[in-house]
Image (spheres, rainbow, N blue to C red):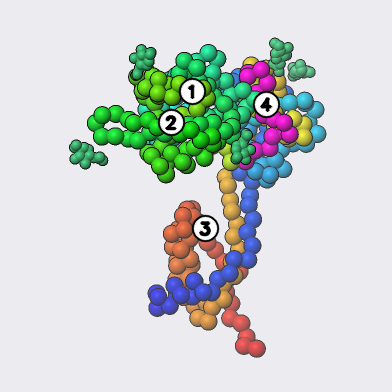
Amino acid sequence: MGRFVALLVLWGCSLSCCSYVQLRKYYYINQNMSWGDAREYCRTHYTDLATIESDNDINGLQSGFSYEKAWIGLWDDPSSWKWSLGSHPNSWRWSSIGEPGRTSYSGFIYDDPNAQGAREYCAVMMEEGGWYDISCERNHSFVCYTASNGSGKVFHHVNTIKSWYSAQEYCRSHYTDLATIENAMENDMIFNDTQRLYFWIGLSRVPWTWSNRSPVSFTNWQTGQPDNQNSTQFCAAELSDHKWTDEDCSTRMVFICHKTMMSKTVVKMQIKASADLTDPTVNAKVLQQLRTKLTNQGLTNVVLRWRSPPTKQKKP
Ligand SMILES: *[C@@H]1O[C@H](CO)[C@@H](O)[C@H](O)[C@H]1NC(C)=O
Ligand SMILES: *[C@@H]1O[C@H](CO)[C@@H](O)[C@H](O)[C@H]1NC(C)=O
Ligand SMILES: *[C@@H]1O[C@H](CO)[C@@H](O)[C@H](O)[C@H]1NC(C)=O
Ligand SMILES: *[C@@H]1O[C@H](CO)[C@@H](O)[C@H](O)[C@H]1NC(C)=O
Ligand SMILES: *[C@@H]1O[C@H](CO)[C@@H](O)[C@H](O)[C@H]1NC(C)=O
């Protein structure tokens, strides 16, 4: 009997419709504050500075509010990447380990990294062996390495120009990976050997996270934004049409908080069965099997109920 019901569930149900109930409620706060103070205020009185992750969220924002710009919870926190390699989602990572700096060694020099133009998320080595952040799309020669047993790394300068990601692909298929540099001696070794300017090393980073450091999958930037004007714009604000722009985090402006509400997804199903669903035993087993199937697919807290309980239908 159990097996029979399982088959019924697999063959007999069709997904007819589903609807999504909004996750967050937004609150416009008419006080001028820096991004950091606004976040503090939102965390005290609501959940956080506004996280906006879909067109559905945007539809939940107020319209016709009379402000020029309002802070939202998106930032590219310089403390996670500017003064050290760091260990936050926006920090620099070595391609070989896919993780933020395993050692604290950093070869960035002068004012770099600075995310100039909000475009520079990959690192090159240049004069004096110093590192700079530049756009990952640019084409340069690069240094790969082979992990070797005991006697340290062996570095290989590849004299072909590629973007950072193509260089990474090349190094991964011919050697171990793009160069991972963990101390000044390795840095010198590479620089002494190549004596060139501008070549990729294995360091890159992903910009922007939400206030709670959750990753960004949806964006709604205004055309031409973000631009990190003067290399001082690391916090995001929405304009009155809900498009985003990057601004200096210390600017005082009004802001939007959100409160997280219960999320609910409603899925309507139609079940066709040749068994007698009006029989309470069969009926309970169908629901039980369906619940197990949904749980196995990673859906938790599933509540299942009949919209109207099955009733006996007259044979045509
Ligand atoms: C916030 O600053 C703007 C621009 O300086 C100003 O027009 C507005 O009146 C200020 N709002 C409040 C509530 O102080
Ligand atoms: C890099 O080279 C590729 C392939 O030759 C080319 O399509 C691309 O436009 C170049 N990128 C830049 C920024 O010049
Ligand atoms: C590392 O070195 C040891 C001893 O020289 C050798 O037995 C081993 O196979 C080497 N491992 C790799 C991955 O090269
Ligand atoms: C690199 O070159 C400099 C200057 O020629 C030299 O002093 C240094 O020892 C070299 N370092 C390495 C690791 O080869
Ligand atoms: C950029 O810097 C210039 C010169 O210091 C200044 O006049 C301008 O207001 C700055 N722009 C922003 C957006 O900070």
CA distance for labels 1 and 4:
30 Å
Q: What element carries label 2?
A: strand
Q: Mark 1 points at which residue?
A: 196
Dot 4 alpha-carbon crowd within 10 angstroms: few under 14, some 14 to 19, many 20 or more: some
Query: What span is colored magenta in the figure?
Result: 218-232
Quadrant housing residue 186: top left
Q: Give the amino acid type for the residue marked by disc 1 in the picture.
A: Arg
State left or right for residue 256 relative to residue 179: right
Instruction: Tell me which label, 2 or 4, sits earlier in the chain.
Output: 2
**Residue 242 belongs to magenta span:** no
Q: Name the residue under label 4.
A: 227
Dot 3 alpha-carbon crowd within 10 angstroms: few under 14, some 14 to 19, many 20 or more: few
Q: Give the amino acid type for the residue marked by disc 2 in the picture.
A: His
Q: Give the amino acid type for the residue marked by disc 3 in the picture.
A: Val
State left or right for residue 61 relative to residue 10: right
Instruction: Tell me which label, 4 or 3, sits earlier in the chain.
Output: 4
Looking at the rendered structure, which numbered label has been put on residue 157?
A: 2
Q: Which quadrant, please, contains the C terminus?
A: bottom right
- Of tags 4 and 3, which is closer to the observer? 4
Q: Are marks 2 and 1 in contact (CB under 8 Å)?
A: yes
Q: Give the amino acid type for the residue marked by disc 4 in the picture.
A: Asp
Which residue appears at 73% of the width and 33% of the height? 222
**Residue 222 belongs to magenta span:** yes
Q: In this view, does 7 lie above or below 236?
A: below
Label 1 beta carbon within 8 A of ligand 4: no
Q: Mark 3 points at which residue?
A: 303
- Residue 119, position as x, y percentages in the image: 61, 29
Instruction: Tell me which label, 1 or 4, sits earlier in the chain.
Output: 1
CA distance for labels 4 and 3:
46 Å
